[in-house]
Each structure stands twice: as structure tokens, then as C-alpha cells.
């Protein structure tokens, strides 16, 4: 395992906004404190969950500075510095280095769609050369970017640039992860970028994942971190029990519903971070607004979120208790008061499709 990389759970932190759409830096520090208090291994600032595509670069940099300062001496800090523009990625990585971040995350360049060869040569390598002492984690998520850095190119990067010693794997393809382990070797770090399959890829003997960069640890950092730690220590039965308890929340990272229109039924996906921000609103952590073009959920989607969080609170109250204690929330009231539920639908949903 390379310096700056470690086993554990890292929260892909949401970015809270005020009612007027500005970044809520006070709220940002508070949710970071919640993560630290509950034993998170590290925090990823301004990843996809942090709505990086809708932030100005000034906001992007200030959030990195805020989280780097907040985590110093407390837990690891990863800065999302990826772009579809190599010059921006180099510049942002330089700032992250000055801020004292432990690592940077470089998402595959989105929309312009370079080949894996181009991603390696024209994107990751220039950053790795410019900052050889910075740990660089490629983020492979073809469902978001429309392109993919392949295992073979990850191995070539690692051979030439030892500071590119790990990957955030969000292909959803266990065979691709197995190929990455085969190409990159035993000391390469593979993090899961999908909450729902993190347990599987960590316990698969051909993958041997070393942790996860999680969405739902925004609301349950203690439980998700404990699941990962159990796997690392070889306590698979205990990890499996936690995985089953957390599975309903993991299923909410993306919520898909079938909606009726005058022209027929359509599929509607509420993608991360919309559902987790709706959860945080329901739990009274902060208002659940996202930046446009992300908007609101459908009524069916929010009903799914409410049913799920009630189920988790009823069957495994210990999972959400740390959030309730830290933020001073009466979860029973927040989840079961009809007047509050009416408000959730008003605030978090479109009135119709």
C-alpha cells in the first residue's frame, strides 16, 4: 500500500447550500465534525456527491481548504481535483497540495470522452509528474463520464508513477475489479465507489478491496466504518450483519421510479446526491436542496426514501442514533409526524411529473 492510502471508509461529503443557493460553510464544518466524531477514516471534499460540477472554482477551492483544515490531525483528507480539462486538474491539485491534503481524486474526464490511453497519457500522467509527492487516486465511473480508464492503463500508470497507487472503482463490474487486481498487483489499493457492492469487493479473494468511498456514510459514518473495519480484521460474520442492516440505505444512493405521463410511462432516476440530501433534510441535519440542474424528487421516490429510513430506524435504531445525538434530533418525531411528512413532500418533491 502506497503512502497516503489506507484501509477504511471515506465519506464523499455532501456540500450543504443555504436557501439562496450559496455554499453553507458553517454547515459544511458541522457535518465534517460529525464525521470525525464518529470515527471516519477520511473525508473526500468536492467529489460527485459534493456536486463538484456545479461549483465555481473559487467555491471548489474554498471547500477543499475548509475540509483540509478541519481534518488536519483528525482523519485523512482527499480533495476532488478532477476535471475534463487537464490544466484545471493540475491547478486544483497544486492547491490541494498547498492545503495539506493527503490525496487527490481524479475523475475520468467527462463528456469529451478521451480513450483510456489518452486519459493515462494526457490527464493522469501530467498531474502525477507535476506532483510526484501527492497520492493520486483515479476515479473510474463510466456511467457518469462516458469513458473509462482501463485496468491495463492503471497498471501502466502505477509502474511509471508510484504515487498513482490506488483507484476508486465505480464500474459496478466485479470482473473489471478482478482484472485491476491482476494487472496492478497485491500492493495496489482498490476502493469501492459503490456502497452496495463494497462488502462483496472487499471479501472477494480475487479483488481484496481495501475500503470504500461512501455516500451513505454521510448519515451513518459509524456503522459504515465499522462494517469496513470488521472486514479488514477478518470478522466477516460481523461485517455481513452490518451490511444487511445497512443494505436498505445503500439502495437509496440512486432511486428509480416509474412515472405516468399523458404520453405513457417513463423511468425517472433521482441520482446521488438527491436521495441522501433528502434524507438529511428529513433527519433535520440541513436543508436538502441541490444545485440546478439537480432539483427535486418525485412523490414515489420520496415515499421510497421515507419507507426505507423508517424501516432502518425501526429495525436497527443504532445505525441512525449517532446522527440524532450529534444534531440533537428527535428521529421518532421527524419520521412519524404527519405534519412534518406533509412538509417533506412540499419541499422535496415536484407536485407532479
Image (tube, helix red, strand yellow):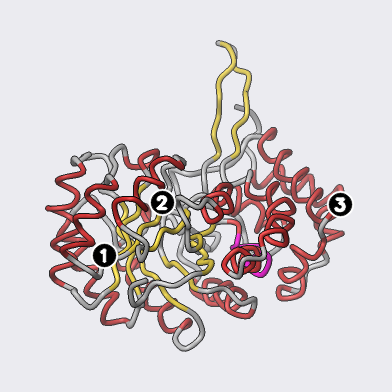
Residue at image position (86%, 59%) is 333
The residue tagged with tag 1: helix, strand or loop? Answer: loop
Secondary structure mostly taken by the magenta-highlighted segment of the chain? helix
Query: What label does residue 169 carry, if any?
Result: 2
Residue 1 in view (yes/no): yes
Depth check: give the residue in front, 199 or 326: 199
Q: Which badge, 1 or 3, is on the more N-terminal residue?
A: 1
Q: Give the side of residue 26 with respect to residue 314, left or right.
A: left
Give the distance between the C-alpha atoms of the residues marked 3 and 2, in whole angstroms: 37 Å
Q: Which badge, 1 or 2, is on the more N-terminal residue?
A: 1
Q: Give the side of residue 218 with respect to residue 22, left or right.
A: right
For label 3, the crowd category at 10 Å Cα-Cα, with few meaning under 14, some 14 to 19 and many 20 or more, is: few
Depth check: give the residue in front, 297 or 22: 297
The residue tagged with tag 3: helix, strand or loop? Answer: helix
Q: Quadrant of the N terminus?
A: bottom left
Nearer mark to the viewer, of 1 and 3: 1
Query: What label does residue 309 carry, if any?
Result: none
For label 2, the crowd category at 10 Å Cα-Cα, with few meaning under 14, some 14 to 19 and many 20 or more, is: many
Q: Using the rendered view, name the quadrant where residue 30 is placed.
A: bottom right
- Range of magenta residues: 217-223
Q: Give the side of residue 197 with respect to residue 88, left or right.
A: right
Residue position marked by numbered label 1 in the rendering: 164
Position of 270 relative to 61 (above/below): above
Q: Is residue 234 magenta?
A: no
Residue position marked by numbered label 3 in the rendering: 336
Amino acid at each position: 500500500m502506497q503512502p497516503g492510502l489506507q484501509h477504511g471508509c471515506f465519506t464523499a461529503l455532501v456540500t450543504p447550500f443555504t436557501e439562496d443557493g450559496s455554499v453553507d460553510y458553517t454547515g459544511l464544518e458541522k457535518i465534517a465534525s460529525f464525521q470525525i466524531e464518529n470515527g471516519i477514516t477520511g473525508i473526500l471534499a468536492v467529489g460527485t456527491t459534493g456536486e463538484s460540477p456545479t461549483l465555481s472554482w473559487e467555491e471548489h477551492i474554498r471547500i477543499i481548504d475548509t475540509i483540509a483544515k478541519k481534518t488536519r490531525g483528525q482523519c485523512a483528507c482527499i480533495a476532488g481535483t478532477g476535471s475534463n480539462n487537464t490544466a484545471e486538474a493540475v491547478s486544483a491539485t497544486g492547491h490541494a497540495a498547498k492545503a495539506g491534503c493527503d490525496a487527490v481524486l481524479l475523475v475520468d474526464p467527462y463528456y469529451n470522452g478521451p480513450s483510456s490511453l489518452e486519459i493515462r497519457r494526457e490527464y493522469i500522467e501530467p498531474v502525477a509528474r507535476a506532483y510526484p509527492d501527492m497520492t493520486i487516486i483515479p476515479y473510474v465511473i463510466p456511467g457518469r463520464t462516458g469513458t473509462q480508464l482501463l485496468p491495463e492503463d492503471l497498471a501502466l500508470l502505477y509502474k511509471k508513477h508510484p504515487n498513482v497507487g490506488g483507484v476508486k472503482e465505480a464500474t459496478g463490474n466485479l470482473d473489471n475489479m478482478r482484472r485491476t487486481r491482476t494487472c496492478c498487483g497485491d500492493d495496489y489499493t482498490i476502493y469501492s465507489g459503490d456502497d452496495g457492492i463494497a462488502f462483496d469487493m472487499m471479501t472477494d479473494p480475487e479483488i481484496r478491496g481495501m475500503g470504500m468511498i461512501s455516500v451513505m456514510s454521510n448519515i451513518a459514518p459509524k456503522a459504515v466504518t465499522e462494517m469496513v473495519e470488521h472486514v479488514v480484521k477478518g470478522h466477516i460474520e460481523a461485517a455481513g450483519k452490518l451490511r444487511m442492516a445497512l443494505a436498505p440505505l445503500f439502495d437509496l444512493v440512486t432511486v428509480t421510479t416509474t412515472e405516468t405521463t399523458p404520453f405513457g410511462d417513463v423511468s425517472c432516476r433521482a441520482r446521488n446526491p438527491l436521495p441522501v440530501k433528502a434524507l438529511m433534510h428529513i433527519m433535520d441535519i440541513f436543508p436538502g436542496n441541490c444545485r440546478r440542474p439537480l432539483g427535486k424528487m418525485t412523490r414515489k421516490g420520496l415515499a421510497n426514501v421515507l419507507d426505507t429510513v423508517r424501516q432502518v430506524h425501526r429495525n436497527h435504531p443504532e445505525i441512525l442514533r449517532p446522527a440524532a445525538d450529534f444534531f440533537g434530533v428527535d428521529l421518532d418525531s421527524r419520521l412519524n409526524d404527519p405534519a412534518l411528512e406533509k412538509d417533506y413532500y412540499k419541499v422535496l418533491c415536484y407536485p407532479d411529473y
